[in-house]
Image: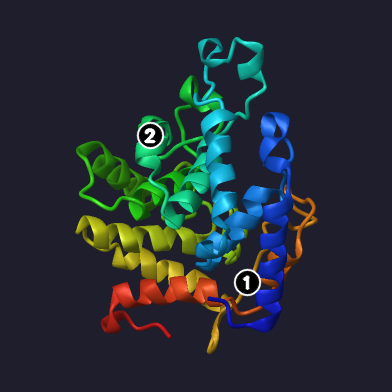
Amino acid sequence: MVTNPSIRLVVEESIRFLESTLQWVTAHGEHTRQKWDGAWWHMSVLYEMGEVSQIPESVIVKAKHLLETQVWQTFVISVDDQPTTESDKMKMDCCHCELAVFYKILMAYGCDLDRELPWIREWLLKHQLPDGGLNCEPEAYTGSRKSSIVSTLPPLEAILWHTDREYTEQEAAFLDEGARYLMEHRLVFSKQTGNVIDTEWLKPCFPRFFEYDILRGMSYLAEWSRRRNRVLPVGLLLEGLERLNSSMTAKGLRIGRQVFDPQGPWSGQTFPLLETVSGLGDVSPYLTRQLDRILERLGPQHAYL
């Protein structure tokens, strides 16, 4: 439960918005998925804060109903994948990372989507490319066969964190191949050139939604190693800590990037909760918590802070 009074006020404001919005029934989901002030993004901030339980149950029911009735349940790669009826053409089309974010929110709340909407997990597992990642660009499945780190992390997290039983062989392979993909790219590097793919990924970002930063990749590898009983890539994680050094303080990890940066590619409208928890230069308790779990996994012999 949020104890900071200023954050508590904006959380309550987001909850009121979610309860009153009509976005859940908007044709084709134009406003529902509107970055960065649509309904799903209010829910995602609460999820990333660890406050998903504060979302009213009535809102969860509406969100689940939207996924069940207003989403085209096929990733369109070829003409054969496209909807044909007028009613289906009105449905919201999703990509892997977007769908995985929705899935994580509802699963964290306690929904049993694998029973109620099994097509979502099947979708995520189905679209892993040979290099171990996924790509939200359909052309990657018919052309380059190369993945996108941004598209890859949310699906990996969805399966890794939200499976409350033994992983199936398919799920285990999915997670292991995803880890291989991250390790082969050394979290942020191009395999072809050896250069950092995007220098913005070196800056801790909160909240992320489906964006990537180096801490997100490190967090996946640390948790994958624990849950899959695999060797921890210590050297790679220590390299990551070195690259995060300028963002570290005695009080925790500072935010270095806003996903909705007005000067960036994803600029858009925001809302008070998003702005309050994403201040540039602010120490983020949420990112610090994630960093602490990585440090704990590394153990005292690799103490960094």
Q: Which residue is mark 2?
A: 118
Q: Earlier in the sequence, mark 1 or mark 2?
A: 2
Q: Position of residue 155 (x, y in %)?
A: 43, 44
Does residue 228 lie above or below 8 as drawn? above
Number of other residues with Cα within 10 Å of mark 2, as a class: few under 14, some 14 to 19, many 20 or more: few
| Image height of 47 relative to 113, above or below | below
- Identified by mark 2, the residue type is Pro
Give the residue displayed 71% in from the left and 42% down from the top.
23
**Numbered badge on residue 255:** 1
Residue 223 locus on image (x, y percent):
33, 62
- Left or right of 127? Residue 264 is right
Q: Is residue 56 visible?
A: yes
* Nearer to me, 302 or 136: 136
> In the picture provided, is 280 more to the left or to the right than 295?
right
Q: Residues within 10 Å of mark 1 (few under 14, many from 20)?
A: many
**Quadrant of res 8:** bottom right
